[in-house]
Each structure stands twice: as C-alpha cells, then as structure tokens.
Image (cartoon, grey):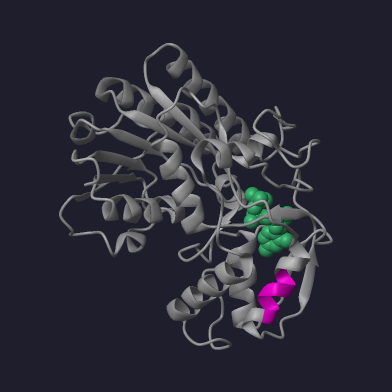
Amino acid sequence: MKNGHQKTVLVAGGAGFLGSHLCERLMADGANVVCLDNLQTGRRENLRKLEGRDGFTFVKADVVDPLPAKVTQMRFDRIYNLACAASPPLYQADPEHTLLTSVLGTQHLLKLAEASRARFLQASTSEIYGDPESHPQPESYWGNVNCTGPRACYDEGKRAAETLCFDYDRLGRAEVRVVRIFNTYGPRLDASDGRVVSNVVSQALAGEDITVFGDGSQTRSFCYVDDEIDGLVRLMEYNGPQPGPVNIGNPAERTILELVDLVLALTGSTSEVAYRPLPTDDPRRRRPDIEKAQRLLGWQPSTPLEMGLRATIAWFEARDGAPGKRRGEGLRLSA
Ligand code: UDP
C-alpha cells in the first residue's frame, strides 16, 4: 500500500456500475475493500474479478436498514457512499425507497464514519442542479429542482444527503467529501438500465430502432468511467480544508442526436431513429464547470467520447455476441 498503512475501505453500492469500478481501483491501490450492496441494481457479476481475492469482502445489505453487525463491528479508514439506483426508470420504480436510500442510508453510513473516524465520500449528482438556468453548472449554483415531480425522489434525496454530510462535517462528527457526478458511461453499464448510452449502444448493435426522447436536441456531457473513478479517489484523498461539493464530469457537451450519430458511425449500424415523448422534468442541458476539480485536485478527464464509446461498444459486443446477432436482451425502456 502506498504510504505504508493499508487502508480498510467500505464501498456502499459497490456492486453497481461505478461502485464495481471503484472497488477494483481501490483493490489495485492495495486497500482492503468491503463491498456493501442490496443488489437492487448492482450485480454480483460486476465483482467477478474481485470475489475470492484476499482483502475483498462482499456483504449483501440495504443501507435503508440498520447496518449489519459484521460491518458496524469493523473499523474503516474510508467510506464511499454510492448506494442508490441512478437511472430514472429504475429509481422511479420505487420512489419511496429511492428517497430513503439517500436520506436514511446516508445517515446510517455517516454514523458508521463517525464511530470509525473514517473519511466519508458522498456520491452526489448533477441532478442537484435540476433543469439548470445557469450554464455550465458551477458548484455555487443552487439548482432548479421540481420537488414534486417524478425525479424528485432521486434529486431531493441527494440534496438532503448533501445537507446531512455538511452538517456532520460542520459539527466535527465526520470529515466529508461530496462529489457531484455527471453522466458517466463505460463497460458494465447495464443494458436494462434504461440510460441513453446503454440503450443506444444496445439498440445499434441489435439493429433495432434507436429511441430518442423528445427531439434529441437536449444535451448531456458524458464522462468515461475510469476518468470519473480517478476523480472520486482524488477527492477522497484531498487533504486540504473542507472543499465543499466538487463537480466531476466531462465538460464536452453533446446533443443526444450527436451521441446517436457517433454510436451509429462506430458500430456501422443501420438502425433508424424512433422519436418518443420527452420524460417529465428531463433537463434541457447539462455540462459541468470543472474549474474547481482542476484547481484543487489537478483532475480533468482524459478520455475523448469516441475512445470511451469504442471501449463501451467492445464490452457490449464481447458480452452479448457479434454485432447484429443479439437482440438487446433485458432491455427496458422508460417510454
Ligand atoms: N434518452 C433518450 N433515449 C433513451 C434514453 C434516454 O433520448 O433511450 C435521453 C433522456 O431523455 C435524457 C438523456 O437521454 O434527455 C440522458 O438520459 P439518461 O437517462 O441517460 O440520463 P439523465 O437524464 O439522468 O441525465
């Protein structure tokens, strides 16, 4: 382990897309990793490279419930909270559970951090900014969230979790770091997740219609998973005074139609675009201002979208068979 001391790290939500990449990175850095997940959207398959290895433990538990004794009896140096379904159709399937995952789950994990004297990193989100009136979004922007809409269970839960984190930090109960994650993609994005990159890649490879919600002129800024994970670890290990929330995302902004065109070109697919209604409260545009991450952490993304998409497409192909032969199994769409 770098710096001599071998860290013991808890990753809540560790079997998910981001969580499993984070567990791998932490194991590669020499940490003991305890992965906690209720497997609602996470999958044991995501941990295939880690299970059975010394220093890696999987615990199945839901952070909404009191944490299991085998976890509370341990002492952690670091606690990462990535526990929450993040895809709109999946987090809207049980909105009460989604809200409580962020509120009660974060409280349970903060209490564990307090007892352990562990540093705590909360995976917050660009959804904090809602449908933003300020563009790009700096951390100082307070956001434009509809607190009664179908996205509120996720957005308001994450906002309340940030509140809890900064109160614990102000009161000296735990040292916290809060990262605001923007749209991230890469290998292991679940084809049934309903998100735009996984849907478009699955549909293009299967030769099915590409579902574009609205007219496709809305924008997102897509960050490759390895860049995102590096930003999370750098923020956790940032040793200065409380930095406040930090955006980690790729500022290269694209319309959804630009993303579709790129995927069609990279896959050589002849799929057609099928337009569907825009979901309620779908943000018009999103792009991180990453000046703070650059200045404090020396971080910026290094993977261009085309390169990241090539890796993602290759992963989907390897998992599901040759292009044109698979049928996007398990694909679930929100519209
Ligand atoms: N989207 C789309 N087709 C899909 C899935 C999503 O056009 O099959 C759109 C969606 O309406 C949104 C954008 O792509 O405008 C990103 O959606 P995603 O669910 O990936 O992320 P989020 O809305 O949480 O940023």
For the question of whether residue 329 can be seen, the reply is no
For residue 82, what is the image quadrant?
A: top left
Tell me: 50 left or right of 318.
left
Residue at image point 76% right, 54% down: 219
Vertical order, 114 against 306 (above or below): above
Residue at image point 66% right, 86% down: 268
Quadrant containing ligand 1: bottom right
Vertical order, 141 against 262 (above or below): above
Q: Main SS type for the magenta part?
A: helix
Residue at image point 50% right, 32% down: 178
Vertical order, 213 against 268 (above or below): above
Q: Is residue 264 magenta?
A: yes
318, 233: nearer the viewer: 233
Task: Magenta stretch: give its range.
Answer: 260-265
Vertical order, 139 against 92 (above or below): above
Tell me: 304 left or right of 97.
right
140, 93: nearer the viewer: 140
234, 66: nearer the viewer: 234
Horizontal and vertical percent position of residue 185 = 55, 60
Horizontal and vertical percent position of residue 34 = 26, 44
For the question of whether residue 136 can be seen, the reply is yes
Split into 4 quadrants, where in the image is the C terminus? Answer: bottom right
For residue 255, what is the image quadrant?
A: bottom right
Horizontal and vertical percent position of residue 201 = 60, 72
For residue 224, what is the image quadrant?
A: bottom right
Residue at image point 58% right, 88% down: 324
Farthest residue to the left: give it: 54
Q: Is residue 131 magenta?
A: no
Farthest residue to the top: give it: 171
